[in-house]
Image: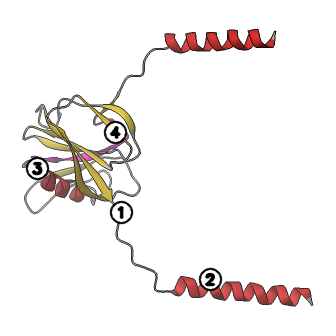
Amino acid sequence: MKMKQLLAGSILGVALLALAPGASAVTLDFTSASYVGYETPGHPADAADVAGYVNFLITLAVNTTGTDGSGNGYVRSGNAFNNLGTAVPTTDFGTAPATVTLDGSLQYLTAHYGNGAQVVWDVLGLTGTFDVMQSGGVAGNGLSGVLGFDGSSTTTVPDGGSTVMLLGAALSGLGLVARRLKK
């Protein structure tokens, strides 16, 4: 009897999964929680220059604007992020892809819209298929390219040995306390 119930339940579960609607891709746009901001006028669009744009943008405080030494304008979104690393170019998704597939390893995704803007999203940890908005909105130009960037962590300075010395002192102190409590 239990075997029949288990089999019937399994068949019902598979049938319900088959009837469930397929998951659609999430759109990366200005309303996304991963939206960092944009740079305009967005030229040139080679990966090294775009990395510079991203790295300037992430230095801005939330909900602020700024300009760099080249006269490019930046608008930082109201979204706060932890651990925004330095952008290092890694992936060229090509010209005008409607969707991108992410594996969680990239820090940033940028979309170039004609000569209108570079829009930046923090995609670290995101996996799956994502639609990239087709119009930049900022200047009304259509999508012309998508780039992915790793975010190198900030350089850390090796410990000068003080941590090890403090740990040793703490362990020695615990040893002394344990000896006294035994007496």
Q: Position of residue 77 (x, y in %)?
A: 30, 46
User: Disc 2 designates what residue?
Assistant: 167
Q: In terms of depth relative to the viewer, which is nearer, 3 or 113?
A: 3
Q: Earlier in the sequence, mark 3 or mark 4?
A: 3
Q: What is the CA distance from the residue labelled 1 to the residue labelled 3?
A: 22 Å
The amino acid pointed to by label 2 is: Leu
| Contact flag, marks 1 and 3 (Cβ < 8 Å) | no
Q: Which mark is residue 46?
A: 3
Q: Earlier in the sequence, mark 1 or mark 3?
A: 3
> What secondary structure is marked by label 2?
helix
Give the magenta-colored segment's residue range.
29-42
Image height check: is 168 above or below 8? below
Q: Which mark is residue 102?
A: 4
Residue plotted at (12% across, 31% down): 142
Left or right: 80 as drawn, with respect to 88:
right
The amino acid pointed to by label 4 is: Leu
Q: Position of residue 119 (x, y in %)?
A: 21, 43
> What secondary structure is marked by label 4?
strand
Q: Position of residue 110 (x, y in %)?
A: 22, 44
Q: In terms of depth relative to the viewer, which is nearer, 68 or 155?
A: 155
> What secondary structure is marked by label 1?
loop
Query: Dot 4, how many residues are within 10 Å of its Cα: few (below 14), some (14-19), or many (20+)?
Result: some
Q: What is the CA distance from the residue labelled 1 to the residue labelled 4?
A: 20 Å
